[in-house]
Amino acid sequence: MSLAAAVVNGELVQSTKTSTTKASSVSEKTSEEASSMDKDSFLQLLVAQMKYQDPMEPTSNTEYISQYAQFSELEAMNNLSSNMDLQRATALVGKEVIVKSTGASGDTTYIQGKVDYVSQEGTKAYLYVDGNKYSIDDLDSVVDEEYDNAMNLAKNFASSVEKLPNLAYLTSEYKDVVQNLTDVYNDMSSYQKGYLDSASVSKYKQYAQRMQEILEAEEEQEEAVAAEEA
């Protein structure tokens, strides 16, 4: 094996083994860190590897080309993954999603909201849900629009039923409210009705039945009065 060493003041300060080991170390570092570096950093590492190689046994140009090609392939894959994440995030704008949020204590909570807009920082895509920023990696699930509509209908229906007065105090003044509930209920599909709380449906039907009785009684009374006047 050829020897290459620097001599300072008559003393040997570097051997071929040391130089080769250093170059080998740089080469190993190249393969380990290539996936986490940008192109400029990789080129600087290659320059360092060339600088510390054994001039008597230089590294083959083929090896340099192979290393650069390997890095370029990794870089292309990273860019493709980044672009796919951004496209996926952009497609979620305006949709209802559930994202994970991890607190300082390590506890994970799930937050549901609509995606207002997205951004990209470096190679990472972010979702903005109700004014808060979440990584695309924190996305847990996308809420189906039909499911979301059914849940909102069920929630609003139950809320309207709860606002009705005690059944004993129900009067014809509430006929429009009860009729509106009847219209909403009848317009619901079987799928949407499946999300209604059974207690709310039972209560609504009691009020609808009672309202029908009240209106019929008032109509009979009006007919009786009209008959007497005739």
Image (spheres, rainbow, N blue to C red):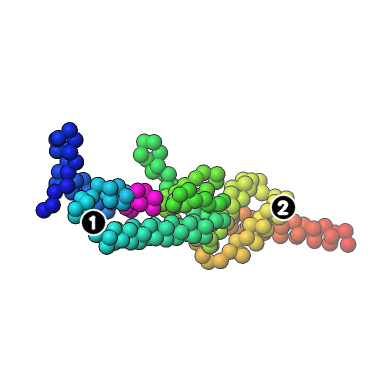
Circle 2 crowding by C-alpha within 10 Å: few under 14, some 14–19, many from 20: some
What is the CA distance from the residue labelled 1 to the residue labelled 2?
96 Å
Could you say where residue 112 lies in the image, as x and y percent from the top left? 49, 49
Viewer-nearest residue: 67 or 13? 13
As drawn, is 57 to the left or to the right of 70?
A: left
Q: Disc 2 marks which residue?
A: 172
Which residue is located at x 82 percent, y 57 percent?
225
**Mark closest to the chain's N terminus, 1 or 2:** 1
Magenta span dominant secondary structure:
helix
Which residue is located at x 22 percent, y 51 percent?
55
> Is residue 53 in sight in this rendering?
yes
Callout 1 amino acid = Thr
Name which quarter of the figure residue 58 lies in: bottom left
Could you say where residue 80 lies in the image, as x and y percent from the top left? 42, 61
Viewer-nearest residue: 177 or 32? 32
Circle 1 crowding by C-alpha within 10 Å: few under 14, some 14–19, many from 20: some
| Residue 59: numbered disc | 1
Could you say where residue 185 lies in the image, as x and y percent from the top left? 60, 61
Q: Which residues are magenta?
A: 34-44
